[in-house]
Image (cartoon, rainbow, N blue to C red):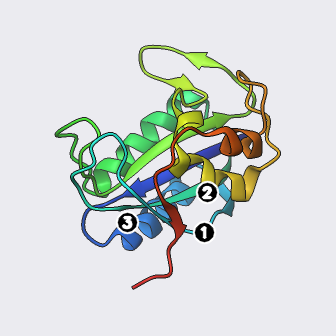
Amino acid sequence: MNRVYLLTGGNVGNRQQYLYESSRLIGESCGKIIEHSAIYETAPWGKTDQAAFLNQALELSCLLPATDLMKQLLIIEQTCGRIRAEKYGPRTIDIDILLFNNEIIQSDFLTIPHPQMANRRFVLQPLNEIAAGYLHPVLKKTIAQLLQDCPDKLPVKKFSGI
């Protein structure tokens, strides 16, 4: 059984509903969601002239190999209306594999651990909630340490709903 950490997020339409729907589809087609963080409202990163995002970290137990999991996650994104129009642009849902066991994978299709996770507070804050002691296999720091050292100072706050 593979232990996987994902980050879901989006800033278009009913953001909360897209998180719920993507989680439901992940649970149906990818494996069992073991734990999930609170939902966080986060400032846009990379392209700042857009609406705030909602993000949530998930711990998943699955049998799929990493490449097959990524293919299934891309299908879920499409099912939820994801359109890839511009880099860092607005989206209904984005699903990233952050960590896959302790594996280090580098291919044209997939890089694990997620190459920018240590530089993004919107990733580390929710991930820290469910995996604070998890040791990053490349950087050899826990998620809690990465969050403490994170250079990104953009606001990340728990979402209280509408």
Quarter occupied by residue 81: bottom left
The residue at the point 78 percent across, 38 percent down is 142
User: Disc count in the image?
Assistant: 3
User: Could you tell me the amino acid type at mark 3?
Assistant: Tyr
User: Residue at point 19% right, 37% down?
Assistant: 86
Q: Which mark is residue 18?
A: 3
Horizontal side, residue 50 vs residue 132: left or right? left
Relative image position of residue 29 (x, y in whole percent): 52, 52
Relative side of 140 to 88, left or right: right
Residue 37: where, in percent of width, then height? 64, 63
Q: Secondary structure at mark 3?
A: helix
Q: Amino acid at mark 1?
A: Ala
* Chain-order first, disc 3 or disc 1: 3
* Mark-to-mark CA distance, 1 and 2: 7 Å
The N terminus - image quarter: top right
Question: In the depicted view, which residue is nearer to us: 119 or 3?
Answer: 119
The residue where tag 1 is placed is: 38
Name the spot of residue 30 as percent of width and height, x first: 56, 48
Vertical placement of residue 18 versus 45, above or below: below
Earlier-in-chain disc, 2 versus 3: 3
